[in-house]
Amino acid sequence: MSEQQDFNQTVIEEFRANGGRVGGRLDGVDLVLVTHTGARTGRALTTPLGHVVDGDDLVVVAANRGSATHPSWYHNMVANPDVTVEVGSATYQAKAIVATGDERARLWDRIAALKPFLLDFQDKAGPREIPLVVLRRA
């Protein structure tokens, strides 16, 4: 396993053991676990992600720390949008929908105001527009 995979596994275990709460550098971060299907492998993968609540939906940001490429979980959710969401101690099925147009603009303005570091990530990403993925309960 890579260092990132090891870190994610530790976060997943702590999240599940503590009803959605984790400590350390993620203490106080609104986290969600999303189980998605690998686009190439077909394997179930679980990824801890920060989120913002938008009405009944959760929104996750495919910032990839400002990389020039999208994170692998984003590609997986585009290829296979049926996901399982764990938030707090609740688990439910959802559809991952990439926000576009006016919806994306509205969400980006709101999320960037709450998490201004994302503006730096967008600058670092260059021409890549950071996708916003809406997790809508199925």
Image (spheres, rainbow, N blue to C red):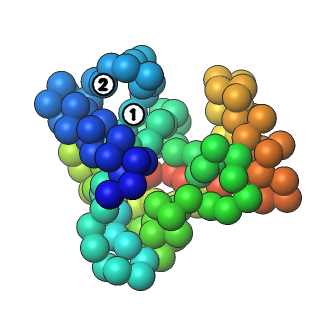
List x then y, in percent, for residue 34: 35, 51
Foreground of the two, 113 or 3: 3
Q: Crowding at label 2, few (<14), some or many (≥20) Cα neighbours within 10 Å?
A: many
Q: Quadrant of residue 32?
A: top left
Q: Residue at x 73, y 41 (%)?
A: 121
SS state under label 1: strand
Left or right: residue 94 compared with residue 14: right
Q: Quadrant of residue 87?
A: top left
Point out the residue furthest to the left here: 17
- Numbered badge on residue 16: none
SS state under label 2: loop
Q: Residue at x 73, y 58 (%)?
A: 68
* Amino acid, disc 2: Val
Q: Could one spot residue 87 in this view of the protein? A: no
* Amino acid, disc 1: Leu
Q: How many marks?
A: 2
Q: Which residue was labeled with disc 1?
A: 31
List x then y, in percent, for residue 7: 35, 41
Foreground of the two, 135 or 67: 67
Q: Which residue was labeled with disc 2?
A: 22
List x then y, in percent, for residue 99: 63, 56
Quadrant of the image containing the C terminus? bottom left
For the residues bearing labels 1 and 2, Cβ distance under 8 angstroms = yes
Closer to the chain start, of discs 1 and 2, is 2
Q: Could one spot residue 30 in this view of the protein? A: yes
Report the Cα–Cα distance between label 1 and label 2.
9 Å
Indicate whether 81 appears above or below 132: below
Foreground of the two, 10 or 57: 10
List x then y, in percent, for residue 44: 27, 67
